Structures are given as C-alpha cells and as structure tokens.
Image: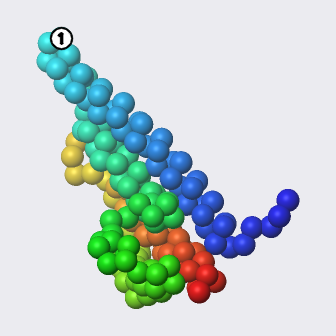
Amino acid sequence: MARLDWPDQIDRLNQGAAWIGRWAILLMLVVGAWNVVGRYLGLALGLSLSSNALIEAQWALFSIAFLLGLGYTLQRNGHVRVDVLHSRWSPRKQRRVELGGTLLLLLPFAVMVLLVSLLPALQSWQIWEQSPDPNGLPRYWIKSLIPLGFGLLALQGLAQALRLRRER
C-alpha cells in the first residue's frame, strides 16, 4: 500500500470529521422532530416530553456538523466564492489567485479564530461550564469545537496551498 503524503492525511482527517458531522445532522433532525412532537403530544397528555437539554442538543449537534465540516467543505470546494472573474482566467492564474487567497485570507483568519477561541475553551473546561438553563447541557465540550473546527480548516488550507504550489 502506498504511503500517503501529509496533504492526503489531512484530507482523510477532515473526511472523518465530516463523517461525524453527517451523523450529527441526522441525530439533530431526530431530536428536533422529537422536540416538536413531544411538545404538542406532551401538552395533550399533560406530560413534559421535551426538555432544555433536548432543545440545547439541537444547537449542539448543529455546531458539531458546522464546525467539523469546515475543512471538508474547503476540500470539496464547497465554500462560497465570487467566480465572476475566475471563469475567465487561465488555469495557472486561477491557481495563483487561489493560492494567494488561501495564504493571505483563509489561513490568517482560521488561525486567528483558533487562537482567539482557545483560551475561552480552556477556561470553560477549567470551570466545567454548564448551561444557565435548568437541566441544560455542559458547554465546555461545545466550546472546544470552535478551535478544533478552525484548526481543521487551517490544516485543510495548508494542504490545499501545498497542492496549488506543486501545480504551479
């Protein structure tokens, strides 16, 4: 079996993260459907079939899908772009602009968000931060997803930049 170079390993890492994100979306839909059904069925039966934990689970699962999918979306060229001029350029110029945008815009932004979010995530773990709502979920692990997601995005940006550099 051929050994993968590190951009390919980053691709695989982001594919694994996206796999988790896909399952989070499916679970989010199930929890959301239960919250709707449980609210109305609970009212009819005089029971409480939903909770703050289930409501917060929806946004937590969305956060998992969104943040763990950042790098994979870049890998698949799924991020929003303005391609008005791009389609008129030669392939070489397209790669050069893509490389410049990755190095000058994407990577600094992703690293900045990672660095800015790291301390609040660590502090949240130190105090075992909980939701302020009754029966809410812990917040510390969700806050950890921010630096993780942007770290995965930065890694994917590096992998893309290396590939673009090779193609020049």
Instruction: Tell me if residue 17 can be seen.
Output: yes
| Residue at 42% in and 37% down | 26
Examine the image and state in which quarter residue 121 appears.
bottom left
Q: Measured from the top left, where is residue 68 in percent x and y?
A: 46, 57
Q: Measured from the top left, where is residue 103 in percent x and y?
A: 45, 86
Asked which colour scheme the image uses, the reply is rainbow
Left or right position of 116 against 102: left
Up/down of 65 relative to 92, above or below: above
| Residue at 40% in and 42% down | 25
* SS class, disc 1: helix
Report the amino acid beneath label 1: Leu
Instruction: Tell me if residue 141 can be seen.
Output: no
The number of numbered discs placed on residues in the rendered structure image is: 1
Q: Measured from the top left, where is residue 27 in percent x and y?
A: 41, 36
Left or right position of 119 against 32: right
Disc 1 packing (10 Å; few <14; some 14–19; many ≥20) = few
Examine the image and state in which quarter residue 142 appears.
bottom left
Quarter that holds the C terminus: bottom right
Q: Measured from the top left, where is residue 50 in percent x and y?
A: 25, 28
Up/down of 117 relative to 58, above or below: below
Q: Please state which of residues 34 and 68 is positioned toward the viewer in this rendering.
A: 68
Residue at the extreme right of the image, as rendered: 1
Dot 1 corresponds to which residue? 45
| Residue at 33% in and 71% down | 83
Examine the image and state in which quarter residue 11 appears.
bottom right
Up/down of 59 relative to 67, above or below: above
Quarter that holds the N terminus: bottom right
Left or right position of 78 against 135: right
